[in-house]
Amino acid sequence: MQQQPKRQLNAYLPDESATQALGAALARALRPGLVMYLHGDLGAGKTALTRALLHAAGHKGAVKSPTYTLSEPYRVELDGRMVNVIHYDLYRMSSPEEFLDAGFREDFNNDNVCIVEWPEKGAPVLPPPDVKVLLKVSGSGREVELQALSDLGLLCLECLHYPPTP
């Protein structure tokens, strides 16, 4: 049974700076325990959005797609508390059991933020999302839809200030 969104936000990201602005807005709205799924074709901007989010959350180093490692943890401060933001890319995962065998399910708890690219590769063992992000190439930019699917996701979207007001 598919979850119905409690709230959603639709936007058009005409360029990289708009993607960075959305990433920054999401970074300010993150809460420990949040699970975010990123959906979109190759090149839709999933990793670019995650990179913008992590840099806005305070990560200073490089942010690469964990295509071959499947996960990459980052330590950032949220509301004065150090939190792991774990970026998953399940594109190359051969079966959902691989997700379980790697012990990733244990990362989905109230202390971490988990951002998952290609979540359909982890179904049905992947924990459900609080926020689902759908990205689609549109012209020279991207269309994005964010859906809150839980109370924590709703809190995230309620705290999201996008588009930024001048």
Image (tube, helix red, strand yellow):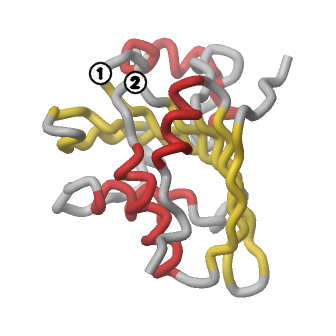
- Asked which secondary structure carries label 2, the reply is loop
- Asked whether disc 1 touches disc 2, contact meaning CB atoms under 8 Å apart, the reply is yes
> 102 or 152: which is nearer to us?
152
Q: Is residue 138 above or below residue 25?
A: below
Residue 3 image position (x, y, % from top left): 78, 24
Q: Residue at horizontal 16%, vertical 33%?
A: 81
**Which picture quadrant has residue 61?**
bottom left
Residue 12 image position (x, y, % from top left): 69, 73
> 116 or 166: which is nearer to us?
166
Q: Which amino acid is tagged 2?
A: Gly
Outermost front residue: 166
> 104 or 1: which is nearer to us?
1
Q: Count every numbered label the image shows and give the total.
A: 2
Q: Is residue 44 left or right of residue 137?
A: left
- Asked which secondary structure carries label 1, the reply is loop
Q: Residue at horizontal 37%, vertical 20%?
A: 107
Which circle marks residue 33 in the picture? Answer: 2
Q: Residue at horizontal 55%, vertical 69%?
A: 163
Q: Which residue is labeled 1 in the image?
A: 111
Q: Can you say which quadrant of the picture contains the C terminus?
A: bottom left
Residue 70 image position (x, y, % from top left): 44, 38
Callout 1 environment at 10 Å: few (<14), some (14 to 19), or many (20+)?
Answer: some
The tag earlier along the polypeptide, 1 or 2, is 2
Q: Residue at horizontal 58%, vertical 65%?
A: 45
Which circle marks residue 149 in the picture? Answer: none
